[in-house]
Amino acid sequence: MQLFSIHTESANLTEEQFFMLCADNKELRIERDKDKNIIIMAPTTLDTGNRNADILGEVVIWNKKTKSGYCFDSNAGYTLPNGAVRSPDISWISKEKYTLLPQSEKNRFGKICPDFVIEIKSKSDNIKQLKEKMEEWITNGCQLAWLIDIENRSTHIYKPNTETTEQSFEAILSGENVLEEFQLKLNEIII
């Protein structure tokens, strides 16, 4: 995905101004890094959108069975403790954590970090930038994050206080103690 960054040292948008910028430009995928630089991303390709939907569907099916939390697509924005506003491809927040969030935060880019995040690398994404983003999720409180690399048919697994691991699509991904009993077989979804 091609990124276009706008350095905002002179603009220094407030949270409200940034929220309004996003609201007024719904057709764009906009994030903001911890230094308040605005990042505009191109829409995904049909292949990427389809894969994202398939994987999100698996998380949603698991969550409907367990009723343990809330699933979000790539349109959900989170204001992280470091000040960045990010939108992962797929995210999940436990019911306990989400219910503590005031309603006013649920109607904005909530000041909360998801418990679980998936980013799916498309052909045009920069792997180095995505890995940095994954580290940012973990640093800000995410408990489990998967960077799915379609081209190389591998997944990078991120957890707090643990070295990043990598596994092939043939291995079964486990939700571990975050998404208990959730398993994902990428080689059955991404052919």
Image: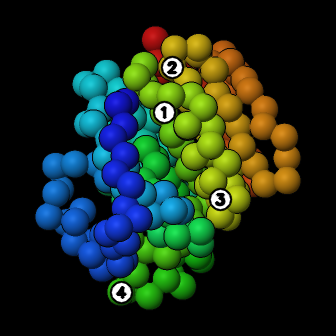
Image position of 144 (left or right of 48) = right
Q: Which residue is mark 1?
A: 120
For residue 142, which numbered disc appears in the image?
3
Secondary structure beneath dot 1 equals strand
Secondary structure beneath dot 4 equals helix
Q: Is residue 179 above or below residue 94?
A: above
Q: Nearer the viewer, residue 83 or 106?
A: 83
Q: Give the mark nearest the N terminus, 2 or 1.
A: 1
Q: Nearer the viewer, residue 140 or 66?
A: 140
Q: Amino acid at mark 4?
A: Ser
Q: How has the structure been colored for display?
A: rainbow
Quarter occupied by the N terminus: top left
Residue furthest to the front in view is 10
> How far is disc 2 from disc 1 in space, using C-alphas?
7 Å
Residue drawn where x is 48% and y is 33% of the image: 120
For the residues bearing labels 2 and 1, Cβ distance under 8 angstroms: yes
Q: Amino acid at mark 2?
A: Ile
Q: Is residue 106 visible?
A: no
Q: Is residue 7 visible?
A: yes
Residue 170's x, y, as percent?
Answer: 66, 16
> How far is disc 2 from disc 3 in space, using C-alphas?
22 Å
Residue 125's x, y, as percent?
Answer: 45, 28
> How far is disc 4 from disc 1 in space, using C-alphas?
30 Å
Q: Which residue is mark 4?
A: 104
